[in-house]
Amino acid sequence: MSNQTDYTKMVSFPMSGKTRTITAQIVSELMAIAPIDAIEAGVVKYFLYKNHIKNVQNLLIKSLTSSEAAKPIFDYLVENNLELDILDVEKLFELLIPEKDKQLNGAVYTPSYIVDYIISITVNRIGYVCDPACGSGAFLLRVLKKFKQIESDIPYTELLEKYVYGLDILDYAIRRAKIILSLFLLINGEDKPEINFNLVIANSLKANWKTFFPTISSGFDFIVSNPPYVRIQDLSTSNKTALANRWIAAGKGNFNIYFAFFELGFNFLNPSGKLGYITPNNYFTSLSGVSLRSYLSGKAAITKIVNFNHLKLFENAQTYTCLTFLEKSYKEDYFEYCYVDDKNLLKNLSGLKFSKYYFAWLNNKKWRLMPENDYRNIKKIETAGLPLGKICPIKVGIATLKDTVFFVEDLEGEYCKASASGKEYNVEKSITRKVVKISSVDNEEDIRMDKRRIIFPYEKIGGTYKLIPETKLKLQYPNAYEYLLASKTILAKRDKGKKSYPAWYALGRTQGMDFKGPRLYTRTFSHYPHFMLDTAEDNLFCNGYAVFIKKPQMKHVKAIQRILNSELMGYYVKRTSVEIEGDYQCYQKNFIENFSIPDLTEADWNYLDTESDSAKINERLLRIYSLHSLF
C-alpha cells in the first residue's frame, strides 16, 4: 500500500518485540502517521485484534475497522506490540485532545482511580446517571461496571440504553465515548448493530435538558463528572454575561465555569439524588469562589469533601484538586472531611479517614476546612489575644514586573552596575534605593549585606511620589536614562504588552513606595514560618510581605518574631492557608492576619525576648495559648 510506504519513511519503530504502553510520545508518533480520525479507526481495529474479537455486528465499530485509513495506524501498533486495554484506549483518546480545547473547554484526562472512587461513593444502586461533561466516557464506563456488580443478570447493553446519559460540547468527545462504550460491550460478549446511546453534543450550561432527555422527568439519581475548568478570562464577552446571569453559583467576578456545573448538577438531581465531582480546590478560599461557597453552604447538601491540597493528580496540569459529594435530601448538620497530603494514600482511597465538619463553622468569605480537633485549636489560637493584623500593619511591597531591568548592583562610590544588550552601564546611585527581595534572602545578615538596589524613577512632590518626567530624567540621570532606553523594548513586553503604564519606564506596581519603619519579612510561600527582621527605616521590598512593628511593640520585637517563627504559627498556617506542590504553605496577609498575639505578662515577654531554644519556646507558647498539643 502507498500509505505503508509513506508512514514507514516518517517513523522508525523498535523491532525488539517489547511491549510499549500508551504515552504522550506514542500519541505524537501516531499523529505523525495519520490524521486523528484515522488514528481512532486504527486503534479500534487494533483493539479488536488484541482481544480476538471477530465478525462484529456493531455498525459504528464496523465502519471504523473497514476504513482504509485505519491500516497505517494498525500496522504501526502491531509493529510496536502496544498494550491496549479499554482504559488504554480511553487514555489515548484523551491525549488526542487538541491543546486549544484543553484551554477553551477544560478537557483533561481523569485518573482512573479517582473515577472509581467517585463512583464508589456516589452510585449505590441502579438508577439514572448522567455526566454533564462526559468527554470520552470515563465515568459512564465505570458506572456500567458498578451497575453490573449490583445486578449481574441485566445485560450491559440494557443498562447503557436505559440508565446512562451524557453531554459534551465537543462532537469528537461524544463520538469517542460511543466508541469506548461499544468496545466495552464487545469485550463483554455483547454485540448489537445499533446502540441507542443517550449521549448528546451540547453545551450543558446552555442546553434544555428536558428536550434532550424527556423521559427523565424528575431528575437524575446520580450525577458524576470532572467538569471543565475554564476561567472567565478565556471566555467570550457574550458567554461571560450569559453564564453570570443564569447561574447563581458563578457569581459576577472572575469565576471559573466549573462553579456553574455544581449548580447545574444539583438542579438536575431528583429529590434523593447524589452528585460526585472532582474540581480544583481553590473554590474553598478564592475571592471568585464566594458565590459558589454561599450556594453550597446555603443548600447544606455536602456529604463529603476530600481535599488533595498540594498533591497533583493530573498529568501535565498545574491543578490542585478536591472531591465534593452532594446529596439532595441530606439532613445532617455536618459533612465528612478528609485532608490528603501523602501520595501513598492515593493508592487506597477507600481507606481514607474522615472527620466531622459542621456547616455552622463555614464562613463564606473563606472556607477553612480541617478536622474537628484542629478547628478547635485554631479557634484558641485566634482568640488568645489581638489579631496580628490589628497590632501590626501587614503590607505587600512594590513590583517592577521586570526585575532584571530595574535591579542593579551597588558599587563603591556614586554608581551602580547594570548591563543591557551586552553593554555595561554605571547608573547613578542617586536614582536608586535599597531593595530587599524577600524570596532571595535567608536571614538578617543577608538583608544587611545585600547589594541589590532598584532604579527608582520617582520624586516626592507634596508628600506623594510622582514619576519623574522623561525630559527631567534624561537631564538629571543621563546614565540611568541611557540604560533604561536600551531596555525599552523589554519593558514594553511586560504583561504581554496589554497593560498601559504612566510612562514606559514606570514600575509595575507603585504601592509600598512610602512604607517606613522596622519590619518582619516573610516569603509568600514557605515550608515553615520564616520571619526576618529588618530594622532599616525605608528599605523598599518585594516578593513577599512585611509585618511592620509599631513603636510600642519594638521593645519586644524579638518576642514577636519568635512567636511568628514558632511551631504554633507553622501549624496555624498549614491548617488555614493554601498549599502548593512541595508542601509549601502560603503566608499572604489574609492567611496570617488573624493569628493572635496574646496579652502577655511581663515575665512571658521577657522570657520570649531572651530564650533562643525553639523547643522551650514552643512548650511555653502551648501553655500561653491553652493548647495541649498540635499534631
Image: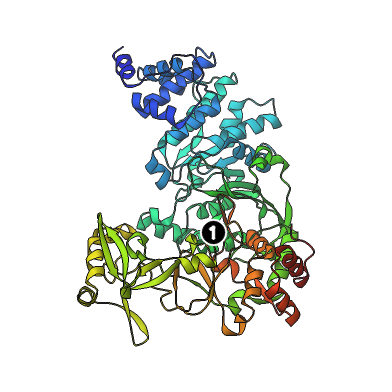
Which residue is at a point 47% across and 55% down the rendered structure image?
256
Give the x, y percent position of residue 435.
Answer: 42, 69
Give the x, y percent position of residue 439.
Answer: 49, 61
Q: Residue furthest front?
A: 412
Q: Could you say which is closer to the camera, residue 183 or residue 85? A: 85
Which residue is at a point 71% across and 45% down the rendered structure image?
352
Which residue is at a point 44% across and 19% down the rendered structure image?
77
The colour scheme of the drawn protein is rainbow
Q: Which residue is mark 1?
A: 525
Give the total number of marks visible in the rendering: 1
- Image side of residue 218 versus residue 213, left or right: right
Residue 84 in the image: above or below residue 407? above
- Image side of residue 480 versus residue 268, left or right: left
> Which quarter of the figure has residue 479?
bottom left
- Image side of residue 401 versus residue 193, left or right: left
Quadrant for the N terminus in the image? top left
Give the x, y percent position of residue 484.
Answer: 26, 65
What's under tag 1, amino acid-wise? Phe
Q: Could you say which is closer to the camera, residue 61 or residue 142? A: 142
Residue 465 in the image: above or below residue 87? below
Mark 1 lies on a secondary structure that is: strand
> Which quarter of the figure has residue 43?
top left
Residue 216 visible in the picture: no
The 10 Å Cα crowd at callout 1, few under 14, some 14 to 19, many 20 or more, is: many
Q: Could you say which is closer to the camera, residue 201 or residue 563? A: 563
Residue 53 visible in the picture: yes
Give the x, y percent position of residue 57.
Answer: 49, 17
Quadrant for the C terminus in the image? bottom right
Q: Could you say which is closer to the camera, residue 55 or residue 514? A: 514
- Image side of residue 184 versus residue 39, left or right: right
Q: Residue furthest bottom?
A: 462
